[in-house]
Amino acid sequence: MTTSHSTARFPHLRLRRTRATAWSRAMVAETRLTPADLIWPMFVTGGRQVEEPIATLPGVSRWSVDGIVARAREARDLGIPCIAFFPNTPKDRRSARGEEALNPDNLMCRAIRAVKDAVPEVGILTDVALDPYTSHGHDGLTDERGYVLNDETSELLVQQALVQAAAGADIVAPSDMMDGRVAAIREALEAGGHRNVQIMAYAAKYASAFYGPFRDAVGSGGLLKGDKRGYQMDPANSEEALREVALDLAEGADSVMVKPGLPYLDIVRRVKERFEVPVFAYQVSGEYAMIEAAAAAGAADRDALVLETLMAFRRAGCSGVLTYHAAHAARLMV
């Protein structure tokens, strides 16, 4: 006996129809992820033909300038449009005031010039902050109580940004969270003839537990006296992030950054919807290390984790993502 089924029992609209095949899923995808959405952070160290693997960042190394040039060529070939530099300043070049940040022949500036000479079509983003150069590990100058001084620090950040711009930086990215530093840097860049140098402001940078491996990478691990909660944002706050972004945009930032990444996707979304400007996120060292640890433990597929997390940034509203997985992710997209 044949049982008849009324079509009324079945939905007229089946959302699974467009998911049934790969070509259809690709056709209706709401968000795209390409190598052009990535910025590749790199750590610069001294010497020649030097590669120093970073134990807390498996698969990531510090490179001497010649190695950085090779990575820049790799970025170009993979379609990654921009690379970011962070120096591992030797301890004997560190000081309480971080004067090495102002040296036009420091590691950062040598790497900028070398890449611009060899691979001029790749953009260079530089970190503007004093923590890779200070003996105490803070992002700025401190008083006798260890309090980071805002205005005095900003004066040095302006000089640091000018040194980097003169070396050839395309984007300077103040990551220090001092009040008013974006306006001061913008004014100095204009006056110094660097009007086309962009500012990507670390506008919402949180005092996070996810930064540990980065501090090892730049040689600040173990140096920090106290913590950075006096200038980086409280993870409990989101309205404050919108105020920070509004100030940095008013002061002349071309784009803004939220840091860390995945734990703060709600901030990315709020910033994008409120301001409708280019918003970037930094998938920081602790986030990278967790993915690598999960993959090493056999708890998840590394490639799938990398692409899914990067897609989450794009879906939340990011114009681009700084990620140590940039080269690996770009290869997966080929």
Image (cartoon, rainbow, N blue to C red):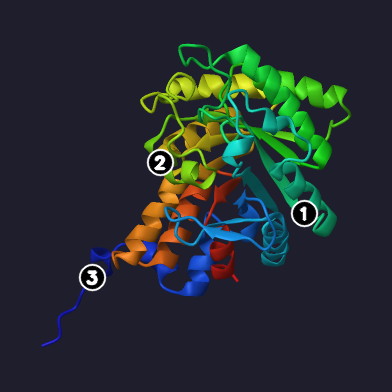
The answer to the question of whether label 3 and label 2 lie on touching residues, with beta carbons closer than 8 A, is: no
Q: Position of residue 115 (x, y in %)?
A: 77, 54
Distance of label 1 from label 2 (alpha carbons):
29 Å
Label 3: few (<14), some (14–19) or many (≥20) C-alpha neighbours in 10 Å: few
- Residue extending furthest toward the front: 92
Which residue does the numbered mark 1 point to in the structure image?
115
Q: Position of residue 260 (x, y in %)?
A: 46, 39
Which residue does the numbered mark 2 point to in the structure image?
210
Instruction: Give the secondary structure at mark 3.
Output: loop
Which residue does the numbered mark 3 point to in the structure image?
6
Q: Quadrant of residue 129?
A: top right
- The tag earlier along the polypeptide, 3 or 1, is 3
- The tag earlier along the polypeptide, 1 or 2, is 1
Label 2: few (<14), some (14–19) or many (≥20) C-alpha neighbours in 10 Å: many
Q: Position of residue 55 (x, y in %)?
A: 43, 56
Viewer-nearest of discs 3 and 2: 2
Instruction: Give the secondary structure at mark 2.
Output: helix
Q: Dividing the image into 4 quarters, which one contains the N terminus?
A: bottom left
Residue at image coords 53%, 67%: 26
Residue at image coords 46%, 47%: 285
Distance of label 3 from label 1 (alpha carbons):
68 Å
Q: Disc 2 marks which amino acid?
A: Phe
The answer to the question of whether label 3 and label 1 lie on touching residues, with beta carbons closer than 8 A, is: no
Residue at image coords 57%, 29%: 134
Q: Dividing the image into 4 quarters, which one contains the C terminus?
A: bottom right
25 vs 299, left or right, is right
Viewer-nearest of discs 3 and 1: 1
Q: Nearer the viewer, residue 175 or 203?
A: 175
Is residue 80 something one can see in this rendering?
A: yes
